[in-house]
Amino acid sequence: MIELISAIIIVAMVFYLIVKKYQPALVLLLAGLILFFVALLLGNPILEPKETTGLGFLDVFKQLELTFVDQLSVVGITIMTLFGYASYMNYLGATDVVVGILTKPLSRIRAKYLLIPIVFLVGNLLCLFIPSSSSLAVILMAVLYPVLRKVGLSPLTIGGVIATVATVVPTPLGADNVIASKTLGYSLFDYVFLNHALISIPTILVMAVAHYFWQRYMDKRQAGKIIVKEEIHNQQETKKVLPPKYYGVLPLLPLLFIVVAGLFFRNIKVEVVILTFLSFFIVLVIETLRKRNLKQVFDGSFEFFKGMGQGFTQVVIIVIGGVFFAKGLQSLGVIEMLMHSVQNVHSAGTILTLFFSGITFLFGLVSGGGTPLFYATIPLIPDIAASAHVDAIQLALPMQLVAHLTRSMSPVAGVIMIVAGVMQVSPIEIVKRTSIPILAGIVTVIVLSLVIL
């Protein structure tokens, strides 16, 4: 009972601090340390006999070291290389080429409301190249907003669509997909294209339709009531010199290699890190042939390694904190209690799916995103699912998708605040435009997960 009470208090502390915008990685690491020290005081073993330092106090920090080493060796390096490649593509301007290619035809469409689902789908495609929702929102507000205003779409409609594009795209380049596939024992290709896509693609289509009807309805309802300042049109930005059009293929290289390997060379064991480094060196060759200045190419290529550092600080450290926190809960025996409690429960899979997704929704709504909770929970899911006699993916995948969707419905989320800030309106006005499409997406995710998985 002491273990359970201690765990509840510490978990509540974690929720509170993350909701209050404390650094989630440090919150999770600190909570993990407290959990381990409580376990130590209660006489629970921290490490296996062969791994112990011989002193219980130091065993806690040895466990932290092992967590860092374990996560950095596989998941961490994968996420960092993907961040590095994306950063390098952005530095070269290849990402801007992709944005230009995909968005230029939109200005020719004159049926303004038809543009709503089209822009939403194009934005989701761009998410394959620009995984950060905030970065994508900044780019689309700069590139697409003026174009769509000229066509006649209302500012709030444009803002509502842009704030929801980076949600549940099935991409093997997503950090959460890398983590989930490793934890659940799937190949990245199988997890993304044979499971994730079965849920996420129909969800994206449902959201596109929901946007069409909801934005039309809200435009009629709010006609003349909400004034949006149009300073965005008067901003003079220095035009970036872009590389040739064929550079638009370069951000796709890791994705193309992953798909080709997954479809045609399944007997060859290649990881995402290998294919990303292969892509990186192919780009180096292309850059050298185009610029014929090896020093300049080498200097620019260092952006790849700077991006790797960003990947560590933005995602990997949160993953490490989440895993360490989960191990702390396990050291108290809380997970074992939960596993015993669901062993003989009828429809345990459905109940657990709704529970994990519901907690993620509430957490994401008040904190601005559910991904920290997902990273902290995913290490626990395989054992819990095994006790409930269900496939772990039935619990993990809907939770993962809900974590992303809820971000675009939270007034404190970065993407909402960016869009609202550019348009100089209250974040609540943007949330009004995103709420129904996001709720439609969440319902679709839950229903399809229970039916298909």
Image (cartoon, grey):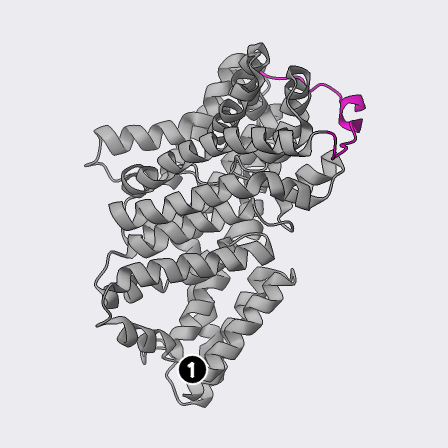
Q: Circle 1 sits on which residue?
A: 4
Return the residue nearer the eye: 436 or 82: 436
Judge whether 447 appears above or below 422 on screen: below
Instruction: Tell me what residue is drawn at x 38 percent, y 43 percent.
Output: 444
Magenta region: 224-243
Judge whether 70 appears above or below 162 on screen: below
Residue 155 visible to the viewer:
yes
Return the residue nearer the eye: 411 or 154: 154
Q: Secondary structure at mark 1?
A: helix
Return the residue nearer the eye: 47 or 209: 209
| Residue 332 in the image, given as x and y percentages of width and height | 40, 80
Type of secondary structure dominating the magenta stretch: loop
Quick one: label 1, few (<14), some, or many (20+) residues within 10 Å?
some
Left or right relative to 452: residue 439: right
| Residue 142 in the image, given as x and y percentages of width and height | 68, 26
Q: Residue furthest toward the front?
A: 221
Instruction: Tell me what residue is drawn at x 57 percent, y 14 percent.
Output: 104
| Residue 81 in the image, given as x and y percentages of width and height | 47, 41
Q: Quadrant of the N terminus?
A: bottom left
Q: Amino acid at mark 1?
A: Leu
